[in-house]
Image (tube, grey):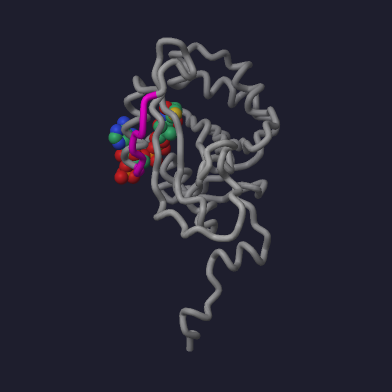
């Protein structure tokens, strides 16, 4: 017989006990919307191929980002950012960069998938993965990203998976182009606690 629910360990209890940190594992195994095996792994030797892949899809294609510059970003060890190759049945088909902690939830800095793989539920699986990684952290109640306002397919995708626009950011990435700052609310903010904030940028005062 199951014990009363108040005696069951919560996800937060388990995370505290195991010391799990969101996005810290070297590999994450997911599945696409079609049930195919999907993995997020280190970029490794695939940086050049993935740089070329990202450069071949919008917004990087239209913005003219060189594949070499993207490849260099994929192997850069930036503090606070985690970069993964997206592998479909172990083949590299995209890249994802997550910045965490960001602002009461992680920031999706880059998500790019090969055109041949669009529409099979990989993007949704990655957004669900982000939400799952912070599910045990009460303060981490949002997902954030920026998307170019002219990248209509991506804006449509983000709306479909629960993001809403919270504001335009003109000239952020490219002069003359506007990024839309988007937010997906995962749950209501946690009640204030005695613990010091861990995921607010300096000076926000929240
Ligand atoms: C945008 C991108 C990440 C989406 O990933 P994807 O794997 O093709 O999307 P999914 O198959 O997971 O789609 C998830 C949902 O979004 C919906 N969707 C996808 N594109 C859409 C669009 N243009 N308009 C409306 N809904 C859309 C799908 O119908 C699906 O809905 P469902 O789960 O209810 O059936 C991918 O197409 C991509 O890499 N594009 C090029 C790079 C890019 O634009 N990246 C974003 C830059 S910020």
- The question of residue 26 being in magenta is answered with no
Q: Residue at x 37, y 36 (%)?
A: 158
Residue 117 in view (yes/no): no
Residue lying at 50% horizontally and 85% vertically, measured from the top left: 3
Q: Main secondary structure of the magenta part?
A: strand
- Taking the spot 55% from the left edge, 40% from the top edge, the residue there is 102
| Residue shown at the point (53%, 23%) measured from the top left | 53
- Residue 16 to residue 205: above or below: below
Residue 206, x across and y down, in percent: 51, 45
From what the image shows, is residue 182 above or below residue 139? above
Residue 186 falls left or right of residue 199: left
Q: Position of residue 60 (x, y in %)?
A: 48, 18
Q: Nearer the viewer, residue 82 or 174?
A: 174
> Can residue 35 be seen in this snapshot?
yes
- Of 185 and 109, nearer the camera is 185
Closer to the camera in the image, 6 or 45: 6
Left or right, 166 with respect to 48, comes to: left
| Magenta region, residue range | 161-168
Q: Position of residue 12 (x, y in %)?
A: 56, 64
Residue farthest to the bottom? 1
Q: Is residue 162 found inside the magenta-colored segment of the image?
A: yes
- Residue 30 placement (x, y as % from top left): 52, 50
Location of residue 27 with respect to 116 vertically, above or below: below
Q: Left or right: 27 with respect to 126?
A: right
* Ligand 1 located in image quadrant: top left
Q: Quadrant of residue 85?
A: top right
- Give the number of marks: 0
Q: Against 17, is 167 above or below? A: above
């Amino acid at each position: 017989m199951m014990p009363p629910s108040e005696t069951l360990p919560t996800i937060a209890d388990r995370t505290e006990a195991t010391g799990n940190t969101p996005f810290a594992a070297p590999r994450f195994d997911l599945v696409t919307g079609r049930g195919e095996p999907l993995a997020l792994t280190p970029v490794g030797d695939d940086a050049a191929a993935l740089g070329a892949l990202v450069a071949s899809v919008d917004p990087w294609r239209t913005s003219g980002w060189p594949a070499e510059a993207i490849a260099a970003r994929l192997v850069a060890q930036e503090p606070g950012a985690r970069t993964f190759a997206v592998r479909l049945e172990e083949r590299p088909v995209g890249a994802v960069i997550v910045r965490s902690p960001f602002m009461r939830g992680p920031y999706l800095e880059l998500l790019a998938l090969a055109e041949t793989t669009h529409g099979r539920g990989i993007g949704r699986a990655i957004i669900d993965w982000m939400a799952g990684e912070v599910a045990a952290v009460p303060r981490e109640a949002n997902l954030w990203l920026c998307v170019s306002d002219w990248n209509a397919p991506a804006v449509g995708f983000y709306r479909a998976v629960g993001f809403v626009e919270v504001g335009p950011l003109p000239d952020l990435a490219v002069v003359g182009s506007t990024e839309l700052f988007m937010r997906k609310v995962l749950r209501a903010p946690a009640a204030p606690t005695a613990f010091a904030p861990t995921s607010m940028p300096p000076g926000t005062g929240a």
